[in-house]
Amino acid sequence: MLEVLPEYSRQTFFSDLIAGVTVGLVALPLAMAFGIASGVTPQAGIYTAILGGMIVSLLGGSRLQIAGPTGAFVVIVASIVTKFGLSGLLMVTMMAGVILLFLGVTGLGVAVRFIPRPVVIGFTNGIALLIASTQIKDFLGMKIANPSEFVERIKMIATHLNTIDWPSCGLAVASVGLVLLTPKIVSRVPGSIVAMLAGAFAVALFHLPVETIGSRFGGLSSGLPPFHIPPFRGDLILPLLPSAFTVAILAAVESLLSAVVADSLSGDRHNSNAELVAQGTANILVPLIGGIPVTGAIARTGTNFRSGAKTPVAGVIHSLTLLAIVLVFAPFARFIPLATLAAVLFVVAYNIGEWREIPLILKLDTAERSVWLITFVLTVVADLTVAVEVGMALASLLYIYRVSQTTTIAVVTPAYVEDGRPHILQDKDVPPYVTILRIHGPFLFGTTEKLREETADVSQYAPVVIVRLRNMTALDATGLHELEVLNDRLKKSGRTMLICGARRQPAHLLKRSDFIAHVGKEHILPHIQAALQHAERMHAGG
């Protein structure tokens, strides 16, 4: 914020104003839905989006980041509320805030890079499935309990299918249609807000016999959120510590991932430590108004950019928009049907699920697939805290395994020397239309950020970029994904990426995955000599 204000202009403000109001309208139904799904009130979700979004925009390290409650926390928050009550949730949120603040101040936030991609995909797949399962009850209008365990929840639903409320079910299906179709008809209008308004008007005008925010919660409180210091219980610190670490890790991962997405959209570069300090501050203060955990929201951040946002002022306006809605339109919220909010969360669960990544994971080796599957299963059938702990342990073991595979011992023979000649650079002429990048050592989770840092500004590179893998000793799914991202960035800038010299394990992983099809088979070369010759043919052909 301090960087952008000195150069702030009226034209920039109007862009931020439109984006802030738009993303505020998008955030409204999501904040209420996340609050309800988390086992608290809808206004708790809105208060979180207001104060959390404001703090992160004022203190954060990204120009476009929008913060608030997200689907990643729904399951763990609901579990904490069930076990420890609302006071336990407020303590967990503040403890997680202190951890995030510590990570940001000390610069230890880089530790979140040491989570491999299969673990992250396993988390998101499992969380998405859990979110969807918690909304089946309201989607179908069933008057039953909603057990906290996934298996028991599915059993309960399966044995009470005869209690489906067809008006609620029909309203939910129609709401899904509106959420999906509205952006295709009017691109700048959020489908979730249209579905919510349509559902509320249908209930108010036709007196539909469906459960609403008013019938379950008595409506939304209008006015400013009440301020109170939550009770502190020293006996709960140790029992709540694992949950606090889980919330902090998820908040850090999702916030920094969202900031990276914002960077890729805008061409900017975020400050990770400043972002974590902002997230930590938000999570410490939000419980004072009864809020739930805060993190960066990828979908809302993307909406913010597409709506024309230029600076963090858009995030502040997003919070003020939500506050204005609470102050003025809160009485009308009692008509919003829960079936519509369940429909909104169904779409959210599908969007955050990273389902398209599963076929790619299944093409990797047994170790990567096993890590993904174990993390996914534990997230669904056990507990998210357990899944995080086991996932991190598996990540450590996987890293040790990968590094152990990098050691090779071989006798140097005349054939070995001759085979190495096409790979050496010393006798090669590198033309001005070629830039060569080399990756030296294991390219695994925890090290991939170095490639992103080195290639932050691809505009300085030549039209053909050769990535030399001769000295890359090991590659995993996270490194593979980073190479795909680099290829897409170079292609978007009008450049071509060539890969050359991959050794046995990296070459095997490239072949097993969809990477070759993604980059192009003709752009994978055996050594630097072949890559330079291919670049010369490309240059000659224009």
Image (cartoon, rainbow, N blue to C red):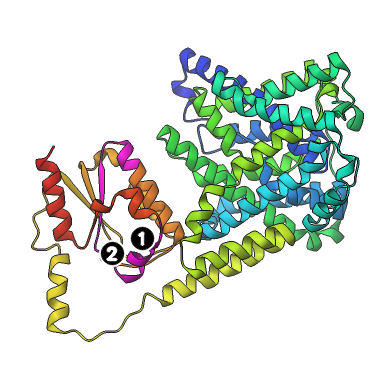
Q: Please report the residue visible at 65 percent of the width from the left and 45 percent of the height from the top.
A: 280
Q: Which of marks 2 and 1 is nearer the N terminus?
A: 2
The reply, left or right, for residue 83 in relation to residue 110 is right
Q: Nearer the viewer, residue 91 or 471?
A: 471
Q: Position of residue 246 (x, y in %)?
A: 68, 56
Task: Give the labeled residue for mark 1.
Answer: 510
| Number of other residues with Cα within 10 Å of mark 1, as a class: few under 14, some 14 to 19, many 20 or more | many
| Number of other residues with Cα within 10 Å of mark 2, as a class: few under 14, some 14 to 19, many 20 or more | many
| Farthest front residue in view | 162
Task: Give the labeled residue for mark 2.
Answer: 502
Asked if one can make out residue 372 in the rendered structure from this viewpoint, the answer is yes
Q: How far apart are marks 2 and 1 (CA)?
A: 9 Å
507 inside magenta stretch: yes
Res. 162 mark:
none
Name the kind of residue labelled 2 in the image. Ala
Quadrant of the image occupied by residue 132: top right
Q: Please report the residue visible at 86 percent of the width from the left and 55 percent of the height from the top.
A: 83
The reply, left or right, for residue 55 in relation to residue 231 is left
The reply, left or right, for residue 539 in relation to residue 230 is left
Looking at the image, residue 19 lies above or below residue 490: above
Q: Nearer the viewer, residue 79 or 527?
A: 527
Q: Which of 126 and 91 is in front in this view?
A: 126
Q: Position of residue 436 (x, y in %)?
A: 21, 53
In front: label 2 or label 1: 1
**Element class at badge 2:** loop
Q: Where is residue 173 in the image (x, y as percent from the top left)?
A: 73, 31
Q: Where is residue 365 in the image (x, y as percent from the top left)?
A: 46, 67
Q: Please report the residue visible at 50 percent of the width from the left and 18 percent of the height from the top.
A: 15
Please give the range of residues in magenta. 489-513
Name the kind of residue labelled 1 in the image. Leu
